[in-house]
Image (cartoon, rainbow, N blue to C red):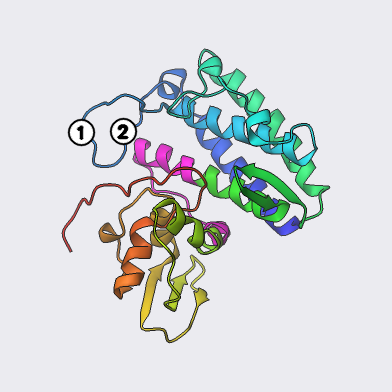
Amino acid sequence: MKAILNDLLAEQSLVDSLVDNLTEQQWQEVIKPMGLQEEVPGLWTIKDEIIHIALFDEAAGKLILGEAESLGDANPPGTHDEFYRCPEKRNMSKAEVLSWWRQVRTKLNWALYNSDPKARIPWAPNLPMSARSLASARLMELWAHSTDIYDHLKIPVKVAERIVHTLFLSWQARPNSYRIHGVEMPDTPIYLELILPSGQIWSKGTAGAQQYIKGKAEDWAMVAIRRRNWLDTDLVVVGDEAKRYASFVQTYAGKADEAPPRQRMR
């Protein structure tokens, strides 16, 4: 747990520094998903991204400390709209949003530090998580939303060795990814082999399997957080089942999200 928390704190500090240096005007800029040429209803601003992270960091802290019994209690109806934005916080200034996020994430980090890593935390409906996995999930979601900001600002996405937490969730959440797409997960062996920023290999599954996914950890992580189409990456995906897994892998709970539209031909 301490190792995960060190990584979570590092990612929080990195994103905090990124957005703290932006102007109030930049905080209000609308982020268009990759490939989208015009604005459509429900698009988020940079402020929305950070508010969303803070809202769920606050909820996670409440759940770990027993201040709420479910995510619905921690984030009651009206807390967010149909696009998962938080209307009641959108009038806050940059300084106010950052102050709130720093407070709630400090409470979350303290709660995680003092929790049993194996304690079951009620998160998404019917999907309780261990405190350890919830810590990884908070890091993953922060990195996912920060990639939206990096992409919008046309800054290369920051990728560190702690991306392993997102990779871990991409594999752990595989059964749920199939379930939310209405597909029964087969027993077909799959091998996932990824190169970390350090050059080390991270792998899961059956080594030597005929169905496999290989490539850079950053590419797979971007696919798993639904920010890239695997066909736009340099991943090597072999086998029909491996391709299906790559097409709807999703690290986070909730409804099935479509993969981003394909941007290039292979």
User: As drawn, which residue projects farthest toward the left?
Assistant: 265
Which residue lies under the disc numbered 1? 37
> x and y percent of residue 63 in the render?
73, 38
- Region of the chain picked out in magenta, as a range: 144-166
Q: Is residue 157 magenta?
A: yes
Q: Earlier in the sequence, mark 2 or mark 1?
A: 2
Residue 95, quarter of the rendered image: top right
In the image, 219: left or right of 122?
left
Q: Is 191 in front, or is 178? A: 178
Can you say which quadrant of the picture contains the C terminus? bottom left
Contact, mark 2 vs mark 1 (Cβ under 8 Å): yes
Residue at (55%, 62%) from the top-left corner? 172
User: As drawn, which residue projects farthest toward the top?
Assistant: 91
In the image, 258: left or right of 132?
left
Which residue lies under the disc numbered 2? 32
> x and y percent of residue 112 in the render?
76, 46
Q: CA distance from mark 2 to mark 1?
A: 8 Å
> x and y percent of residue 46 in the render?
44, 29
In this rendering, is residue 172 above or below 28? below
In the image, 215: left or right of 15?
left
Q: Is 264 in front, or is 56? A: 56
Q: Main secondary structure of the magenta part?
A: helix
Q: Is 76 in front, or is 236? A: 76
Residue at (70%, 51%) from the top-left corner? 5
Q: Type of residue at label 2?
A: Lys
Can you say which quadrant of the picture contains the N terminus? bottom right
Q: Type of residue at label 1?
A: Gln
**Residue 170 visible at all:** no
> x and y percent of residue 160 in the render?
53, 57
Helix, strand or loop under label 2: loop
Helix, strand or loop under label 1: loop
Q: Is residue 122 magenta?
A: no
